[in-house]
Image (cartoon, grey):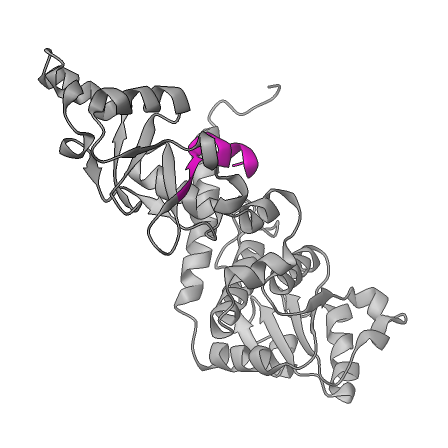
Amino acid sequence: MKNLDPKLNLLEEMRRALVTEGHAVLDLADTLGAEAEQALALLYNCRGKVILTGLGKSGLIARKIAATLSSTGTPALYLHPVDALHGDLGVLHADDLAIALSNSGGTEEVLRLLAPMKRVGIPVIALTGNRDSELARRATVHLYAGAAREACPLNLAPTASTTAALAMGDALAVTLLAMRGFQPDDYKLFHPGGSLGRKLMTTVADLMDTGARMPVVRAWQNVGEVVAVVLEKNFGVTCVVDADGRLAGSFSAGDLLRLHIRDRSLAFLGRPVADFMTVNPRHIGPEALAAEALNLMEKHNIRALFVVNDAGEPIGIIGLYEVLKAIDY
């Protein structure tokens, strides 16, 4: 690296930037009060769409907040302030709400939008880093979303301030999500494509093995017979059912290894598997999301989950690697 200052510690410089931005976000939590509640009430009661606007770096953050709101049940769009002043104001409707971003609170193009928004009757939530700015004073509600210092060593490039504004937008969006009781099924409607869509829409029933592929033994079968099933089905485990066909336990290759270590004579091979099975093994329902099955398997360090119906009868098995492959984890 030519002309690099030998005294410059690159990793320390990165750590300093991250710590500065982290503090900027954490400091916002202490600023929340009545104005934040007013902003949430306006957003929750908005009957139209939420219009985000901002210029430069604030415009980029406004676009991201609009996308987050839209994906979590609040219709939102980004309106470029310059385009708005040259014909795009026609998008405004009296039922709408605006969120205007400007770190300085004095961006001329954004301020010029306030008068036409007021004429239409649209309330404005301002996100700025300057509580005494013109935008803060003229907005319906002002939320501080700035930083004491930028992560930029010159304290010039918008870095910590844009992170703070983005975090405030995220906080509004996820709180609205909670207020509306937004659920995974609602989220799926807005994310049908890509790996996120697969995670949200793929169910256990879509991936589970059933019928002849499923390892099932009876509680009275001897361990020798059960081992053959475990090896044949290749899941490393089999479910054990009781006389009524309900899931009673499981027996795995690991269980076999532990038995062999304890009893080298292999006398256990002739005994019923019920004597050695794991009682009440982990299981899941067919309508659960594949991502939920993955979380269970990772949490409990297991390679497969039994799928049971409402009667407690095993109807399938879902493997870890099949889930990982299906949802591009």
Is residue 328 one of those drawn in magenta? Answer: yes
Task: Provide residue 287's location: percent of width, then percent of height.
Answer: 48, 53
Q: For this view, does 119 lie left or right of residue 182?
A: right
Asked if one can make out residue 131 in the rendered structure from this viewpoint, the answer is no
Q: 44 above or below 82? A: below
Report which quarter residue 61 is drawn in: bottom right
Examine the rendered structure and indicate whether residue 226 appears above or below residue 20. above
251 or 282, which lies in front?
251
Q: Would residue 104 be found to the left or right of residue 115 on screen?
A: left
State the residue at coordinates (31%, 19%). 228
View extreme (top): residue: 265
Residue 311: x percent and y percent? 35, 55
Q: In which quarter of the image is the N terminus?
A: top right
| Residue extent of the magenta highlight | 315-329
Q: Going by the image, does 310 lie left or right of 241?
A: right
Instruction: Please say if 313 is above or below 99.
Output: above
Residue occupying the point 55% across, 51% down: 200
Q: Can residue 120 be seen in this view?
A: yes
Q: In this view, does 133 lie above or below 59?
A: below
- x 26%, y 41%: residue: 281
